[in-house]
């Protein structure tokens, strides 16, 4: 059979024989494109359905992270085998086959790094799931920071491995970076300061993601922290980015970590209120607060405080159990309505700013003199 094939091949024109090998190479590539389509449409979705039925979600995250690299892998294998077939036919120098092999190996390394990078990008969600499942403690602020560090490490390792594959001296590169480290540090001292500021924030944990904080420069909710800066969403929905070095050296008030939330004000009643009424109103307001289910019982002050210019002031100082602003407003409103009810029941009126003017002589006498 081989003799018949070669005798038949010798009868064909030279250009047809040459194109025959190109067509076979293209056929190899198209075959792997077909395999890629079958894998994506049937096999991958079948494996994905099976992983979703398992107890852990780790295998699903890994599979989704490597989905696109696996698709590209079929194209790379098809290209490599078809080009390798052509180099064998064309009898090219071995150096070309070595270069082709290095390109193939570098592509595999890049695909592995790509999938790992995707996995570290979803590591915040992955760590959160693991934390919920195994009930271990980890600060929410630490999760995205660790994910960014892992992505940086993946990219750095991929570059160094590819460089070694092409026989570049990575140790010399690292030594060169060491020699230029001082110049780099001087040029990027602000950036380095921000990185260390981020490390200080991560280790000391003055706040976490989602906390409501207040600094001399901004007040709002923490959305994200990166190597350089922290992003805070203000209550006006503006996004403020603060360098970590600045934030690490500022006093930070974390309102989200309040155990209770304060309510304090002066209640002004009119000067015509009798002493007995004042004493009864003070006692009833204090009793109402002490028995209110949403008021903290440890610190409640209700006292007749001072004689103001146009009112007798009752000082109120107490705390709500909730620290949520919306709930705090609701509890405050409920207390205000109950205080109004107490004043109405006792017939005590709230004072308003006023002034009394006294004349030495009756105003009627003055009018009589003016008419004369």
Image (spheres, grey):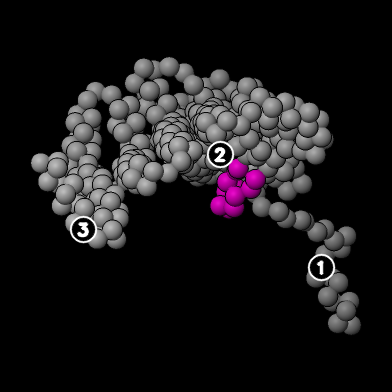
Q: In the image, which is nearer the foreground, mark 2 or mark 3?
A: 3
Residue 298, quarter of the rendered image: top right
* Residue at the spot of label 3: 12
Question: Is the residue 131 above or below the residue 156 in the image?
Answer: above
| Residue sitting nearer the eye, 222 or 330 | 222
| Residue 314 point in image, percent of width and height | 65, 36
**Residue extent of the magenta highlight:** 231-241
- Secondary structure beneath disc 2? strand
Residue sitting at x 64%, y 28%: 169
* Quadrant placement of the N terminus: top left
Q: Which residue lies under the disc numbered 2?
A: 224
Q: Looking at the image, which is closer to me, 35 or 150?
A: 35
- Mark with earlier residue (1, 3): 3
The residue carrying pointer 2 sits among few (fewer than 14), some (14 to 19) or many (20 or more) residues within 10 Å by Cα, namely some
Q: Residue at x 56, y 39 (%)?
A: 224
Would you say residue 71 sits in the magenta stretch? no
Residue designated by label 1: 363
Front one among 360 and 86: 86
Mark 2 or mark 3: name the one nearer the start of the chain: 3
Mark closest to the chain's N terminus, 1 or 2:
2
């Amino acid at each position: 059979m081989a003799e018949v094939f070669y005798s038949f091949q010798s009868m064909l024109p030279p250009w047809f024989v040459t194109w025959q090998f190109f067509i076979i190479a293209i056929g190899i590539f198209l075959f792997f494109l077909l395999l890629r389509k079958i894998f994506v449409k049937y096999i991958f979705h079948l494996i994905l359905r099976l992983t979703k039925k398992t107890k852990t979600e780790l295998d699903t995250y890994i599979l989704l992270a490597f989905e696109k690299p696996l698709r590209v892998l079929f194209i790379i294998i098809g290209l490599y085998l078809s080009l390798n077939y052509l180099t064998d036919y064309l009898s090219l120098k071995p150096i070309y086959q070595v270069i082709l092999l290095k390109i193939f190996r570098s592509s595999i390394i890049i695909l592995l790094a790509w999938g790992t990078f995707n996995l570290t990008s979803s590591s915040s969600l992955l760590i959160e799931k693991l934390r919920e499942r195994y009930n271990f403690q980890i600060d929410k602020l630490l999760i995205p920071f660790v994910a960014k560090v892992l992505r940086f490490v993946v990219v750095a390792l991929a570059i160094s491995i590819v460089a070694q594959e092409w026989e570049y001296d990575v140790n010399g590169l690292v030594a060169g970076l060491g020699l230029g480290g001082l110049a780099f540090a001087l040029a990027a001292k602000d950036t380095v300061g921000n990185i260390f500021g981020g490390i200080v924030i991560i280790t000391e944990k003055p706040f976490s993601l989602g906390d409501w904080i207040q600094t001399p420069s901004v007040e709002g909710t923490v959305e994200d922290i990166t190597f350089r800066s922290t992003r805070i969403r203000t209550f006006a929905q503006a996004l403020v980015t603060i360098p970590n070095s600045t934030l690490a050296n500022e006093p930070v008030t974390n309102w989200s970590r309040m155990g209770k939330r304060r309510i304090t004000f002066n209640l002004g009643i009119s000067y015509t209120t009798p002493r007995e009424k004042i004493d009864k109103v003070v006692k009833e307001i204090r009793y109402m607060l002490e028995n209110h289910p949403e008021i903290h019982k440890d610190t409640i002050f209700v006292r007749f405080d001072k004689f103001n210019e146009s009112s007798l002031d009752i000082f109120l100082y107490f705390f709500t159990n909730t620290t949520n602003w919306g709930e705090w407003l609701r509890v405050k409103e409920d207390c205000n309505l109950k205080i109004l009810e107490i004043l109405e029941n006792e017939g005590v009126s709230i004072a308003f700013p006023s002034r009394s003017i006294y004349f030495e002589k009756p105003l009627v006498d003055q009018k009589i003199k003016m008419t004369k």
